[in-house]
Image: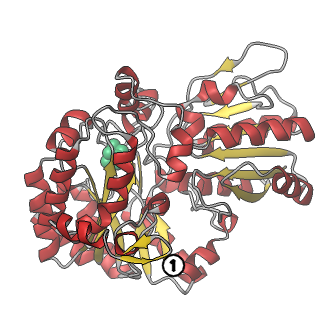
Amino acid sequence: MRILVIQMQATSVPKVRPRFDQALGVLASVLRQDGHQLELAAFSRYQSPEIHDAICRFRPQAIYLQADRFAADITRHAVEFVGRHHVLPVIIGGLYATAQPDAAMSIPGVLAVAIGEPEISVRRFLFALERGDDYERTPGIWINPSDAPAVKNEPAPLSANLDVLPMADRELFDYGAYVARTHAAQVAVARGCPHKCAYCLSDWLADIYLGRGPWVRRRSPGNVCDEIDQLCERYPQIERIQFMDHAFALDRDWLAKFSELYAERCGLPFTCHLRANAIDAESLRLLKEAGCDNAIVELISGSDFVRNEIFDMDTSSRQIERAFRLLATGGIRTTVVHLLGTPYETAITVDHTLELIDRIRPALVHTRLFVPLPGTRAEELCRDSGWLTGLGEKAFRENTPMLRMPAMPAAELTRLLHEFNWQARHPRSSGLMKLLAKLPVGRGKTLYDLLVRHPIPNGRLLPSDPRSIDVREMDGVMNP
Ligand code: SF4
């Protein structure tokens, strides 16, 4: 079959490139092995002429639409357009479909919704669809027959042994262009995560897979190195590996074996995610020996209350400071991910965050406004507290306030966002900011506007260090 993959990305950037996604890449490999032909078209807004063009050019027999978590509105418009103008079976997959399957099923024109990891379920579904067999009982697929009630099948079993899966297909994503731009390759070593951060879907996903195999699974170090060998051969410009998993360094035995093998077989410098509550001298040694020189740490908030009572991160300020001391000693450059405007954010919690950042001194702070992810405990809390507005997806894409919290009005949050990077770099500079606001530079602007008021469009990074990567490109699809 000819299958057009439509990737709906949640970003304010109007014209987007295909974004590599490990799970979609593995699905593409599996489907190509079955003889299907695939092409990918990526969108960040509803663009009916472009969707029409992509369909006319490729002439697909089916559409697999992978939607980001905050791309439901553009997905709905796109599917309705396909339903009105092209008679094609549409399957929706990805995290949006998994977290909100009822909403995805309600879109007119959707034939099927793929829940969770797609390589088993979507493969079986397409196999049956192509042969005209009965596909209504396919595990992991919800079916939307036009003339009968919806069929909601149980999730498919998890792929227990990740080593037997084919390597992700990267041609689908025009991966050579990514390598040419970044001189890096993204690699995922695991699926699932043992943590239960309340702003993340991990625990919810673990629940839907309960009894269907272990949730946290890892590829063997040899299998990971095999993929990197193949990547380096295919894309000689690769100079760095970006490991996408939040759980990358959480299994000490695996990390010890990986460190030895990676140093021996690969040796390229790499970036990875680290959890501040799981970094000690031994893990640091293993990471250093393997070649880690850049780490991304989810700080989220400088408030112990927000981090641990609200988001269940089980990470104290003391652990964070200790972890950053170790990382600095090891010469590992750090990027922190920070969410502004979390539940119970106040001027005091913002000060706590700035003070903590001042103490741990990361090289880069990636700040974005908090928008609760549908299906998470954080969203439940915001709903129960009456803070949710209808702005969710738009707010996420445009990095504007979404919650209405009496203690943190939207205008104040916007001001804090604009000033945050400056304040993180220049602690205790409120007097200087006031002075800059009085110094005109023409066209009604002041030095404050030029130097301080830098909105960070959709979390874009400011410095141009080659190791400064967009953290949004560092998350695997099943590592929400
Ligand atoms: S994937 Fe990341 S955010 Fe989600 S539970 Fe794990 S550590 Fe927390």
Circle 1 sits on which residue?
Answer: 182
Residue 370: x and y, percent?
38, 45
Which image quarter: residue 379? top left
Asked whether mark 1 lies closer than 8 Å to ligand 1, one says no
Which image quarter: residue 122? top right
Say what amino acid the circle numbered 1 marks.
Thr
The relative height of residue 322 versus residue 191 in the rendered view (above or below) is: below
The relative height of residue 202 versus residue 358 in the rendered view (above or below) is: above
What residue is at 56 percent from the left and 44 percent from the top? 394
**Extreme residue toward the top, this view:** 149
**Extreme residue toward the bottom, this view:** 236
What residue is at 78 percent from the left and 45 percent from the top? 63
User: SS at mark 1?
Assistant: helix
Residue 194: x and y, percent?
30, 42
In the visual, does 167 lie left or right of 249? right
What residue is at 80 percent from the left and 21 percent from the top? 145
In the visual, does 199 lie left or right of 80? left
Residue 382: x and y, percent?
37, 28
In the visual, does 185 lie left or right of 301? right
Residue 433: x and y, percent?
25, 68
> For the residue carrying disc 1, how many other residues have a C-alpha within 10 Å: few (<14), some (14-19), or many (20+)?
some
382 or 31: which is nearer to us? Answer: 382
